[in-house]
């Protein structure tokens, strides 16, 4: 079952792999201009 991310102002996206979740987590962190979020914790947040 794919994971779904919710980003305010964007359509929900389906993520089919951990790599996709990792990329999505990094994109969200960049959108908030917070490099501290670009790490394993951000990925765990996206996957859970």
Image: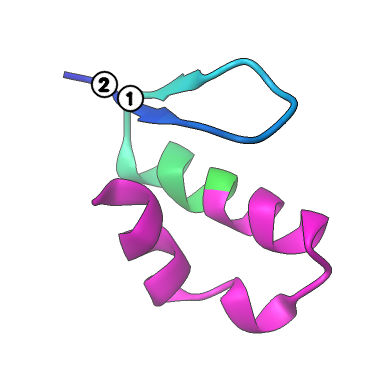
At which x and y percent is residue 29?
A: 68, 62
Left or right of residue 12, residue 31 in this image: right
Seen at 75% across and 75% down, the residue is 34
Seen at 33% across and 25% down, the residue is 16
Provide the residue span drawn in magenta: 25-48
Seen at 56% across and 44% down, the residue is 24
Seen at 39% across and 51% down, the residue is 46
| Residue at mark 2 | 2
C-alpha span from label 2 to label 1: 5 Å
At which x and y percent is residue 35?
A: 72, 78
7 vs 16, nearest the viewer? 7
At which x and y percent is residue 23?
A: 56, 47
Main SS of the magenta segment?
Answer: helix
Query: Mark 2, mark 1: which one is toward the viewer?
Result: 2
The answer to which image quadrant residue 38 occupies is: bottom right
Q: Is residue 27 magenta?
A: yes
Closer to the chain start, of discs 2 and 1, is 2
| Residue at mark 1 | 16
At which x and y percent is residue 22?
A: 47, 52
Which residue lies most toward the left here?
Answer: 1
Q: Are marks 2 and 1 in contact (CB under 8 Å)?
A: yes
Q: Tell me the SS state at disc 2.
A: loop
Left or right of residue 42, residue 38 in this image: right
The answer to which image quadrant residue 3 occupies is: top left
């Amino acid at each position: 079952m794919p994971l779904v991310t919710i980003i305010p102002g964007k359509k929900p996206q389906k993520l089919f792999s951990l790599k996709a979740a990792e990329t999505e987590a990094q994109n969200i962190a960049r959108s908030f201009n917070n490099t501290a979020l670009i790490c394993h914790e951000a990925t765990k947040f996206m996957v859970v």
